[in-house]
Every structure is written in C-alpha cells, then in structure tokens.
Image (spheres, rainbow, N blue to C red):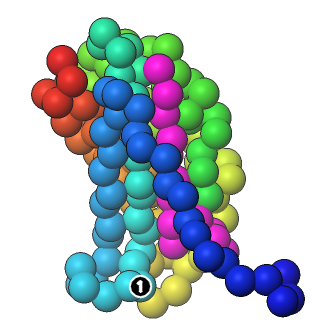
Amino acid sequence: MPGEVLTALIIPDLPVGAQGTFLKLGARHYLVISIAMVAALVTLDRGRIVQAAVAVGSCSATAQRLPALEADLTGRSAADVLAAGAGVILPAHLAPLAPIGDVRGSADYRMEAASTLCARALHMAIEQGGQSHG
C-alpha cells in the first residue's frame, strides 16, 4: 500500500519431516526465464504424506499452487506415490495452469513438462524426506 514500508519478512521453520525440492527446465540454468519450473514440499510422518505443497512457474501469468494435487497427496503412503511415478499427476491436478506457447515451447509442451517436473520433484522430496527423517 502507498506509504507503507516492509520492515521484516518472517518465514516459519519447516515442520519436522518436511523436505522440499525445486526443478527448472530451461535452455540455461543460470537464466531466470524458463520453460517450466516446480517447487514441491512434502512432510512425512511414519511413511505417510501429512502435508504437501506444489507450485508451478512459467506455465501461467504467475506461479500457481496445485491444490487438487496437494489434497490428493495428503494421507497417501509415500511408497505408493513413489511407485505411481508420473501416474500420480492427473490432468485435473494441472487445471490451474494456463501455459502459453512461445519460442521456448508450445503450450502443450509446457503442460507436459510441468507434469513431468511435478512427478520428479515429488519423488525427490519424498526420497530426501525419508532419508532425513526416517
């Protein structure tokens, strides 16, 4: 708001058992511009996903969380999600996305890339969480 000054940004600690990852698909890793990018955070407790957050960038005007995917992951066995691989991502999960086509890739390619990156990011976060927190 006009006249306001941001003086602090408070970021809470991650819950015990939480692990996240970030993946980017682009021509060069050091460039900000990308075809698709995904951030995933999962919290595991005794082999189950108790909380999930997944956001996709470069596939809409702004980065979008995927609430349907997050809800479907919550309560599931981490082993089941790992076994499902890319099949864990359903077209309905990607409904918030509205990718454009440009010189870096078509809208269809970006959607496919987002789906693949989501599956990979979840796989990595789950595996890291299992190693870090039993």
The amino acid on which the numbered mark 1 sits, given as a three-letter code, is Ile
Residue sitting nearer the eye, 129 or 72: 129
Image coordinates for residue 50, horizontal then vertical, percent: 47, 20
Q: Name the quadrant containing residue 80.
A: top left
Image coordinates for residue 21, horizontal then vertical, percent: 30, 50
How many callouts does the rendering have? 1
Image coordinates for residue 12, horizontal then vertical, percent: 49, 47
Q: Is residue 98 left or right of residue 34?
A: right
Residue 94 visible at all: yes
Which residue corresponds to the image point at 56% horizontal and 66% vertical from the top-left? 9
Q: Name the quadrant containing residue 33.
A: bottom left
Tell me which segment is drawn in magenta: 50-63
Image coordinates for residue 107, horizontal then vertical, percent: 55, 70
57 over 126 or under it: above or below: below
Q: Residue furthest right?
A: 2
Q: Residue furthest front?
A: 7
Q: Residue furthest top?
A: 46
Label 1 SS: loop
Residue sitting nearer the eye, 102 or 10: 10
Which residue corresponds to the image point at 42% horizontal and 43% vertical from the top-left? 13
- The residue at which mark 1 appears reads as 33
Q: Is residue 56 magenta?
A: yes
62 over 42 or under it: above or below: below
Which residue corresponds to the image point at 79% horizontal and 83% vertical from the top-left? 4
